[in-house]
């Protein structure tokens, strides 16, 4: 499988690349800073320079692939404007390029509890931008999966998670999110599903496998 990861130098993405390479996949990561290219190569991914905000059409950078993953984000230090231009519009540009390039599969890294307004004004814009990116993906004709993690930590992965349509507030190591993304990409029956994701007691593969039964 050929996979393109937008936000290729993000913390989750950098943990995801080696997992995908270990499964025998070719991985390309979209980045906007040339100085990050060597980090991607070391993680086994091919860097592709593509700024999601300055490019209107990113399809030539996405190219041909079997699946795309949106793991980009403006980040906690950004203002409201970049929540729209990265978190929403970046995800939408990836939808449009997948459609244009006939890539069916799209996995979106979203967030839990988008519907619950909270936090600063900028954070509320982030929640809306993520919600709009989700809506655009659900309305697309693509084979989508929406992964909605709780608060991300940099703790080591445990290999154990909780997955359900709705979960109580919780944390999850980025390494475990990356493990779930890799498993979702390998599990076609997660197509058309969205789910919350926190730390939990179930092994990743088993949790992803059981997902469609929980949601039915
Ligand atoms: N923080 C949380 O608790 C939390 C909870 C749930 C979900 N999430 C979501 O999880 C996702 C990934 O999290 P993470 O911690 O891995 O994020 P991260 O480390 O902040 O990575 C985001 C990546 O997006 C890239 N990016 C930003 N603007 C870009 C642009 N214009 N063009 C191309 N790339 C651009 C950044 O690159 P640069 O280095 O160039 O800036 C960065 O590598 C995000 O979508 C976030 O919203 C976060």
Image: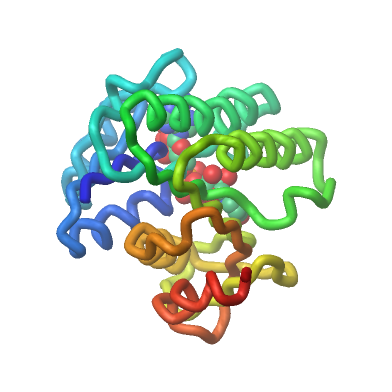
Q: Residue at x 39, y 45 (%)?
A: 105
Q: Residue at x 42, y 72 (%)?
A: 156
Total labels: the figure holds 0
Residue 116 location (% of width, % of height)? 82, 51
Q: Residue furthest bottom?
A: 201
Q: Identify the coloring.
A: rainbow
Which one is nearer the viewer's eye here, 19 or 163?
Answer: 163
Q: Is residue 180 left or right of residue 74?
A: left
151 horizontally vs 52: left or right: right
- Residue 74 at x, y percent in the picture: 55, 34
Q: Is residue 158 above or below residue 54?
A: below
Q: In what quadrant of the picture does the C terminus appear?
A: bottom right
Residue 3 in the image: x percent, y percent? Answer: 28, 45
Q: Residue at x 25, y 28 (%)?
A: 63
* x then y, percent, for residue 87: 58, 34
Residue 210 lies, with reference to residue 3, above or below; the image says below
Q: Quadrant of residue 34?
A: top left
Q: Is residue 57 left or right of residue 124?
A: left
Q: Quadrant of residue 82?
A: top right
Residue at x 43%, y 76% (from the top left corner): 204
Is 197 left or right of 97, judged from the image as shown?
Answer: right
């Amino acid at each position: 499988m050929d996979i393109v990861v937008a936000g290729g130098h993000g913390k989750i993405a950098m943990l995801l690349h080696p997992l995908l390479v270990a499964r025998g996949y070719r991985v390309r990561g979209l980045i906007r800073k040339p100085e990050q290219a060597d980090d991607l190569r070391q993680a086994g991914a091919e860097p592709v320079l593509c700024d999601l905000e300055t490019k209107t059409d990113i399809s030539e950078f996405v190219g041909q692939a079997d699946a795309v993953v949106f793991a980009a984000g403006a980040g906690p230090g950004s203002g409201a404007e970049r929540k729209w231009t990265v978190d929403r519009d970046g995800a939408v540009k990836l939808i449009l390029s997948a459609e244009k390039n006939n890539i069916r599969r799209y996995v979106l890294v979203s967030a839990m509890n988008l519907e619950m307004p909270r936090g600063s004004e900028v954070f509320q814009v982030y929640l809306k931008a993520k919600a709009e990116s989700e809506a655009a993906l659900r309305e697309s004709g693509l084979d989508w999966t929406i992964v909605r993690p709780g608060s991300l930590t940099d703790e080591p992965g445990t290999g154990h998670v909780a997955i359900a349509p709705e979960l109580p507030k919780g944390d999850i190591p980025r390494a475990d999110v990356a493990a779930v993304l890799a498993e979702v990409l390998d599990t076609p029956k997660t197509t058309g599903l969205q789910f919350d994701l926190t730390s939990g007691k179930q092994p990743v593969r088993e949790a992803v496998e059981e997902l469609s039964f929980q949601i039915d």
